[in-house]
């Protein structure tokens, strides 16, 4: 689970950079995208923390396992929401013509 958490943290961080780069998008949606990518990043970081606590056997194993699954699921859901918001912002932004 450590490798999967690290991979998803990397993907989420890369998506954070990619989603905030376009400056011509809808500003309110850009703010919401930034918040949801931040939630995703924090969720994956906390998943990594709980995984390390689980492997070092600090705390109840069953509770840490459930917490790890919930945090990872929240990160995936937040990442999916960000992708949907990016698609909506991209499709609703009028084209920019350079003369």
Image (tube, rainbow, N blue to C red):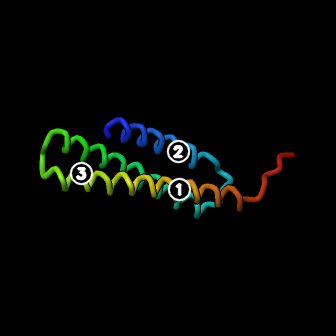
SS category of the residue bearing label 1: helix
- Percent position of residue 60, x then y: 13, 52
2 and 1 marks in contact (CB < 8 Å): yes
Marks 3 and 1, Cα distance to the nearest angstrom? 26 Å
Pointer 1: what residue? 82
Sequence-first disc among 2 and 3: 2
The residue at the point 36 percent across, 51 percent down is 72
50 vs 33, left or right, is left
Q: Which quarter of the picture shows residue 21? A: top right
37 vs 66, left or right, is right
**Front position among marks 3 and 1:** 3
SS category of the residue bearing label 3: helix
- Percent position of residue 55, x then y: 19, 39
Label 1 neighbourhood size at 10 Å, few (<14), some (14-19), many (20+)?
Answer: many
Label 2 neighbourhood size at 10 Å, few (<14), some (14-19), many (20+)?
Answer: some
Pointer 3: what residue? 65
Query: What label does residue 15 carry, if any?
Result: 2
């Amino acid at each position: 689970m450590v490798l999967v958490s690290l991979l998803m943290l990397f993907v989420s961080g890369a998506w954070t950079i990619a989603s905030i780069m376009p400056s011509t998008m809808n500003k309110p949606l850009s703010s919401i995208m930034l918040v949801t990518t931040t939630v995703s990043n924090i969720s994956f970081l906390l998943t990594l923390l709980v995984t390390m606590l689980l492997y070092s056997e600090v705390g109840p194993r069953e509770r840490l396992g459930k917490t790890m699954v919930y945090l990872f699921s929240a990160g995936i859901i937040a990442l999916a929401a960000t992708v949907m918001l990016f698609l909506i912002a991209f499709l609703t932004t009028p084209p920019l013509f350079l003369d």
